[in-house]
Image (cartoon, rainbow, N blue to C red):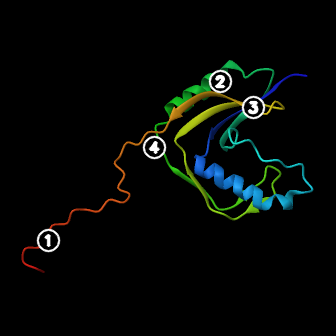
Amino acid sequence: MPLRHHVYFLLYPTPAAADCAAALWNRTRHRLATQKSVPMPPERLHTTLMPLGCFEDRVPDTVLNLALAAGGAVDDEPFELVFNVIRSRGGGPLGTVELAGHGPELCLVDSLHGQGRHEVLCRWPLRQRQQVFSGWEPDVPTNPRGN
């Protein structure tokens, strides 16, 4: 049987977001009792950004080269990704919890269908270019006239 390759760009969650997703699954798994549902292993938990296709036996060089060029052209900063509805792979809603995490890097992945593993083909870090002012309070001079 030929090996199927599902290729896509994805973001892995932060550890805190992965923990939140696991807790949500544990709280709602009773609703999935009729489905053959098991949690995805933490190292495979992800958000798919863009599927690039499914290929038999191997990923064509043209697809791989174009994907590598596209990923290398991304020049973005880390961002916050927030979900307010989480669904199982079967499509059933699991809950309406806020699940947030930052995307520290963009990944190109080859998911080997039926083998339960992802091969990360390339990673591109998202780099902070501007100063973050979270928690920053400006030093405001006092008015010498008192008004």
Q: Nearer the viewer, mark 2 or mark 4?
A: 4
The amino acid sitting under disc 3 is: Arg
Q: Is residue 127 left or right of residue 53?
A: left
118 and 17: which is toward the camera: 17
Q: Mark 2 near mark 4, Cβ–Cβ under 8 Å?
A: no
Q: Mark 3 near mark 2, Cβ–Cβ under 8 Å?
A: no
* Residue corresponding to mark 1: 142
Which residue is drawn at the image coordinates 86% and 57% (left, top)? 32
Residue 64 marker: 2
* Residue corresponding to mark 3: 117
Q: Nearer the viewer, mark 4 or mark 1?
A: 1
* Residue corresponding to mark 4: 77
61 and 144: which is toward the camera: 144
The residue positioned farthest toward the left in the image shown: 145
Q: Earlier in the sequence, mark 2 or mark 4?
A: 2
Q: Is residue 124 left or right of residue 4?
A: left
The residue positioned farthest toward the bottom in the image shown: 147
Which residue is drawn at the image coordinates 25% and 62% (left, top)? 138
The amino acid sitting under disc 1 is: Thr
Quote the CA–CA distance across marks 1 and 2. 60 Å
Tell me the quarter of the picture where residue 57 sits. top right
Q: Earlier in the sequence, mark 4 or mark 1?
A: 4
Quote the CA–CA distance across marks 4 and 3. 28 Å
